[in-house]
């Protein structure tokens, strides 16, 4: 596991700014949605109405198992194998493989590549959990778009909806002068008076 510096220079400043974006409200929405989809708590014994906080939330997700199970619930068979190694010298590699499988599966599910987080964002928490939260919310939106009938998270994404007009309608539109071009349907300033006119006398 990489040992990222946290206390000096640009890295510290960037991490500080990202950490400030962490939202307990977004965490609660994501957590409660995941628990409803998986039908079990993310962390046993924790009150579901109280935010876990960044460290506990990361600890619950960092092995990638819950994320893979979430994806397989949304789309059965999306991830063929989930590594559930409890400990050992290869555990961190298994965890990273779970997370990578999850990230590949969500892209295939319709989540934009720009909404993905990096594996190290979760395993090392070097850039905070705000990026991970954004990704989970993106998965929730994609689930609605793909017709998942279970619990929902966030608003439904808009869909591509092209307009197709026939040639006659297109030609009719070209003959119209839009008001944004300044056409006022023949209006003029004739007869308008803006106060007393200036008189010039000898």
Image (tube, helix red, strand yellow):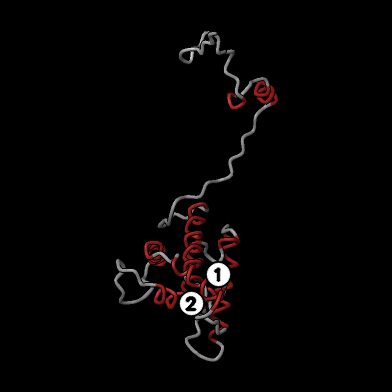
Q: Nearer the viewer, residue 177 or 54?
A: 177
The residue carrying pointer 1 sits among few (fewer than 14), some (14 to 19) or many (20 or more) residues within 10 Å by Cα, namely many
Q: Nearer the viewer, residue 96 or 58?
A: 58
Left or right position of 184 against 43: right
Confirm or deny contact between disc 1 and disc 2 (CB under 8 A): no
Q: Dot 1 corresponds to which residue? A: 102
SS for dot 1: helix
Which quarter of the rendering shows the C terminus? top right
Q: Identify whether 93 is placed above or below 196.
A: below
Q: Residue 40 at x, y = what percent?
A: 37, 70
Residue positioned 58% across, 73% down in the render: 100
Q: Residue furthest front?
A: 202
Residue positioned 59% across, 13% down in the render: 186
Residue positioned 52% across, 62% down in the render: 75
Q: Residue 109 at x, y = what percent?
A: 57, 60
Question: Could you tell which of marks 1 and 2 lies nearer the N-terminus?
Answer: 2
Q: Dot 2 corresponds to which residue? A: 62
Residue positioned 50% across, 81% down in the render: 7
């Amino acid at each position: 596991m990489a040992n990222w510096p946290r206390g000096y220079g640009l890295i510290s400043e960037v991490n500080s700014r990202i950490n400030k974006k962490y939202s307990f409200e977004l965490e609660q929405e994501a957590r409660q949605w995941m628990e409803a989809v998986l039908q079990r708590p993310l962390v046993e014994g924790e009150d579901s109405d109280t935010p876990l906080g960044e460290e506990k939330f990361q600890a619950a997700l960092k092995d990638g198992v819950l994320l893979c199970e979430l994806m397989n619930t949304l789309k059965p068979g999306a991830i063929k194998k989930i590594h559930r190694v409890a400990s050992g010298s290869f555990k961190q590699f298994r965890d990273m493989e779970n997370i990578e499988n999850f990230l590949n599966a969500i892209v295939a599910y319709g989540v934009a590549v720009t909404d993905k987080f990096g594996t190290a964002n979760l395993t090392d928490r070097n850039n905070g959990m705000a990026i991970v939260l954004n990704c989970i919310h993106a998965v929730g939106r994609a689930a609605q778009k793909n017709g998942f009938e279970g619990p929902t998270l966030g608003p439904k994404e808009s869909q591509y909806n092209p307009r197709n007009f026939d040639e006659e309608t297109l030609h009719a539109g070209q003959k119209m002068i839009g008001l944004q071009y300044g056409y006022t349907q023949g209006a003029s300033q004739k007869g308008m008076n803006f106060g007393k006119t200036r008189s010039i006398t000898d």
